[in-house]
Image: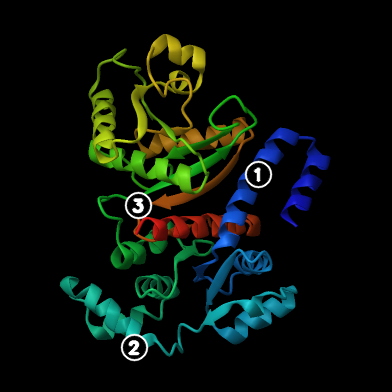
């Protein structure tokens, strides 16, 4: 189904290399998810794009979908939209949930140091975003995807309160998969960039964590066998002196301490990071310069502007943001997303869930 859709795009647009690379990446994600289907919660269970994506994921046997919302409304919408696979989903009524009291007691226990009462917890588990995260914490689900109707802050708040960050990580970040037409860069034109979504002005410690998390995303989601991480700056190996450069140098050192096996170098200018001739000239002897496939930007401003420049001016596909640093995957969607975007992010979330279990 997916391959036929992409081949139609090839016939229509003639952009063979880019579409085949995109197809390969998405097919890899789907195939990996199919081998070990994960329980993925979609809290926006009555949202049209979400339902279409869920129907497709169920048709592909890619995940065990959990929809939150009124069962009658969800099934009625599915029938109206001709979505025959929605009946295979688990549907949880957040206002009439037999496990509501169990979940409320778990939430109250988790948040008692913040003064949460059982009464407050009982109300919160009626909120689909909170309910999904409590289900993950209770071991009844493996990951969550939302944001078609909700803001990033609304999606992240319950995740940070309930699931919390992964061991050794204190900041959440977002990575973007960039599928470009320039096959000479990254992995046949695919690069992973972070942080593009969450932390506005990371300090050196946070930047190091972003580097380690983004390399892990490159491995478990983009399936890079060897992530090569470039810590980007306006300087290459001391060509400029500034406190902003010092932050990147310190972050590179800290990232190496966090993960001694990580292939990482910095500070590097972008051209030195991805163009072999420039890398050899500006950073001779570097095992990353000229061959980076993971790009870590110094702040969110650069990340957001940078990926959109590549997407719009370079006509690249941007998949994400993929949230990183949470103990179990909780991903955010743009409210302008398409059903296809939601489908891809279900595949991403499923792969992250598999990786999280593998590393428990």
Which is nearer the eye, 15 or 186?
A: 186
- Mark 2 and mark 1 lie on one chain; the one further toward the N terminus is 1
Residue at the disc numbered 1: 24
Residue 169's place in the image compared with 312, above or below, is: below
Q: Residue at x 56, y 46 (%)?
A: 319
The single residue placed furthest to the top in the displayed view is 281
- C-alpha span from label 2 to label 1: 44 Å
- Left or right of 111: which side holds 326? right
Q: Residue at x 60, y 61 (%)?
A: 34
Tag 2 near tag 3, CB within 8 Å: no
Q: Which image quarter is the C terminus in?
A: bottom left
- Mark 3 and mark 1 lie on one chain; the one further toward the N terminus is 1
Residue at the disc numbered 3: 325
Q: Residue at x 37, y 22 (%)?
A: 268
Question: How far across and down, in percent of the image, does residue 347 sit?
Answer: 56, 57
The type of colouring in the image is: rainbow
Residue 130's place in the image compared with 27, above or below, is: below
Label 1: element kind: helix
Figure quadrant of residue 79: bottom right
Label 2, residues with CA under 10 Å away: few <14, some 14-19, many ≥20: some
The answer to whether residue 294 is seen in the rendering is: yes
Label 1, residues with CA under 10 Å away: few <14, some 14-19, many ≥20: few
Residue at the disc numbered 2: 101
Question: How far across and down, in percent of the image, does residue 210 sit?
Answer: 34, 42
Which is nearer the eye, 254 or 241?
A: 254
């Amino acid at each position: 189904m997916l391959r036929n859709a992409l081949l139609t795009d090839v016939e229509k647009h003639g952009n063979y290399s880019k579409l085949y690379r995109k197809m390969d990446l998405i097919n890899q994600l789907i195939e990996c998810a199919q081998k070990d289907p994960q329980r993925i919660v979609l809290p926006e269970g009555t949202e049209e794009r979400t339902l279409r994506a869920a129907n497709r994921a169920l048709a592909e046997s890619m995940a065990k979908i959990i929809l939150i919302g009124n069962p009658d409304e969800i099934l009625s919408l599915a029938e109206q939209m001709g979505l025959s696979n929605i009946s295979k989903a688990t549907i949880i009524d957040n206002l009439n949930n037999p496990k509501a009291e169990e979940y409320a007691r778990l939430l109250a226990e988790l948040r008692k140091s913040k003064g949460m009462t059982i009464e407050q917890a009982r109300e919160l588990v009626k909120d689909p975003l909170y309910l999904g995260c409590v289900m993950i914490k209770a071991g009844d689900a493996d990951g969550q995807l939302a944001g078609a109707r909700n803001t990033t802050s609304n999606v992240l708040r319950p995740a940070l309160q309930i699931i919390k960050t992964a061991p050794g990580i204190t900041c959440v970040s977002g990575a973007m998969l960039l599928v470009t037409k320039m096959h000479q860069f990254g992995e046949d034109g695919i690069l992973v960039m972070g942080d593009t979504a969450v932390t506005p002005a990371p300090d050196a410690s946070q930047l190091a964590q972003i580097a380690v998390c983004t390399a892990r995303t490159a491995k478990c989601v983009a399936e890079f066998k060897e992530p090569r991480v470039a810590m980007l700056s306006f300087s290459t190996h001391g060509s400029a002196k500034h406190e902003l450069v010092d932050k990147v140098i310190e972050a590179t050192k800290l990232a190496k301490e966090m993960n001694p096996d990580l292939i990482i170098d910095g500070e590097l200018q972008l051209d030195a990071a991805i163009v072999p001739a420039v890398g050899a000239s500006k950073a001779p002897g570097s095992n990353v310069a000229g061959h980076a496939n993971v790009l870590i930007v110094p702040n969110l401003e650069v990340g957001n502007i940078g990926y959109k420049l590549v997407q719009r001016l370079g006509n690249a596909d941007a998949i994400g943001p993929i949230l990183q640093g949470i103990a179990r995957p909780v991903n955010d969607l743009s409210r302008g997303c398409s059903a296809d975007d939601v489908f891809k992010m279900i595949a991403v979330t499923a792969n992250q869930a598999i990786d999280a279990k593998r590393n428990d």
